[in-house]
Image (cartoon, rainbow, N blue to C red):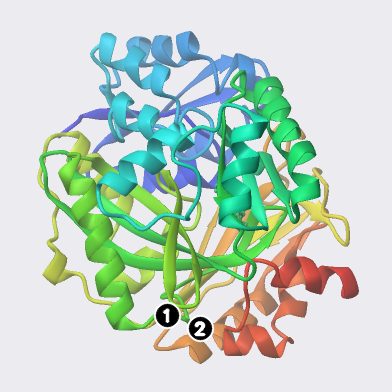
Amino acid sequence: MFKKILIANRGEIALRVIRAAREMGVATVAVHSTADADAMHVRMADESICIGPASSTDSYLSVPAIISACEITGAEAIHPGYGFMSENASFVQALEDHGIAFIGPTAEHIRIMGDKITAKDTMKALGVPCVPGSDGGVPDFETAQALCDDMGFPVIIKATAGGGGRGMKLAKTAEELETAFRTARAEGKAAFGNDEVYIEKYLGTPRHIEVQVFGDGKGRAVHLGERDCSLQRRHQKVFEEAPGPSITPEQRAEIGRTCAEAVARINYAGAGTIEFLYENGEFFFIEMNTRLQVEHPVTEAIFGVDLVREQIRVAAGYDMSFQQEDLQINGHSIEVRLNAEKLPNFTPCPGTITQYHAPGGLGVRMDSALYDGYRIPPYYDSLIGKLIVHGRDRPEALARLHRALGELIIDGIDTTVPLFHALLEEKDIHTGDYTIHWLEKWLETNL
Ligand code: ADP
């Protein structure tokens, strides 16, 4: 086992990794920017090292700074968390060249899944169901036109290098196709330096269902069911749950098996998430995330496993500590994302926390790096915590969420907590009857 690992991240996810490492007897190194000198992850790690100024480009995204920090502290491996360096193939390549282990998949797997056309081709070849559309890249508008006349509208044009909802354009009719095609290309070029695009049938009322997979890098892999993350604002998830309220045990077993077999066949190592749009009982692959997701705790809750511990084990060359038959679902779990944002416009709202009290009790988990007097710096993501609840069934989980939100105190800044109080008043949230458009529509007339 590793003696010491470095966590190339900040905030709640850095704490999450430190906690798993400490339970395993592995020492931790926190890295931080000058703006994060007082951050909780710095206090909680065994050692810490400043890697640059506030701007993430010069600190949390600086490959030389992070590698130097490893060399100075003698850390043998890096956990990237999510965001920052977690899906950066050239970073992983650089670590390989320096003999530092990466707690995650290979650079090659990150590269394949980071290009949407290659990812889709790979998944299709592995038997994973995909959204109908073009066979790879569409070179020019005439080809796009011929294809869409055949396939029918609406369609969505996507930049192969796109991400975070950028480089993606909807064409409802043939008239809208040319503008959508040219805009998606231009956005892909401007934001990602690659103007290759492909086309998919646009699904009208899907849910976002994602399957958690885990591989040992040696041809064995399991799935840990699905999460429903349909409640989104501007493609950002705000409320996630597992299991998905619309998925039957048979569907779970089937899509889970397909996903686990796919990643086993490519010798995938560590945690991964295969994202689908789900409509009328069918799954359609959209992308694979080759990292730990923000919402992984809902999966941990219902399966009773520690995914970060597993990631560290596999990166150190150990086998996974579970097999498919060991993984049984117990109850229901929900996560809500607490952001330092002012409603109704979700304006980022950094500032000083004058009082913080985390909820507790049975089935409540609060993953947060907040503390009394903490000054939230304005330079980074607005996520300040995740409240995760677990109950014997969905109604119990919802009641527990309501109870825990009532106990939570975060004073001094505005947060998204009132959004969740309001959502818990909605019938559709209680019946689980929502698609990826539900929240945006609801926000138009509420708050
Ligand atoms: P990104 O990498 O930019 O997040 P994704 O391919 O994951 O892009 O898609 C982001 C979101 O766009 C999805 O969660 C869904 O809301 C919407 N979307 C993507 N593809 C389709 C499609 N074929 N039909 C309908 N909506 C889609």
Residue sitting nearer the eye, 90 or 29: 90
Q: Give the left or right position of residue 442, taking residue 258 as reference.
A: right
Disc 1, SS: strand
Q: Position of residue 353 (x, y in %)?
A: 76, 50
Q: Is residue 17 above or below residue 406?
A: above
Amino acid type at circle 2 is: Ala
Residue sitting nearer the eye, 305 or 356: 305
Mark 2 = which residue? 397
Locate the C terminus by quadrant. Answer: bottom right
Disc 2, SS: helix
Residue 102: quarter of image: top left
Q: Is residue 130 above or below residue 217?
A: below
Q: Position of residue 273 (x, y in %)?
A: 39, 51
Q: Position of residue 56 (x, y in %)?
A: 63, 23
Q: Is residue 168 above or below residue 408?
A: above
Mark 1 = which residue? 332
Mark 1 crowd level (few <14, some 14–19, many ≥20, 10 Å Cα): many
Q: Is residue 316 above or below residue 336?
A: above
Residue appearing at x 66%, y 58% in the figure: 153
Is residue 243 something one can see in this rendering?
A: yes
Residue 428: quarter of image: bottom right
Residue 420: quarter of image: bottom right
Residue appearing at x 66%, y 21% in the figure: 189
Q: Position of residue 386 (x, y in %)?
A: 57, 59
Sequence order check, earlier mark of 1 and 2: 1
Residue sitting nearer the eye, 240 or 289: 289
- Given contact means CB atoms under 8 Å apart, are the residues at marks 1 and 2 in contact? yes
Locate the N terminus by quadrant. Answer: top left
Residue sitting nearer the eye, 155 or 429: 155
Residue appearing at x 44%, y 77% in the figure: 281
Give the CA distance from mark 1 to mark 2. 6 Å
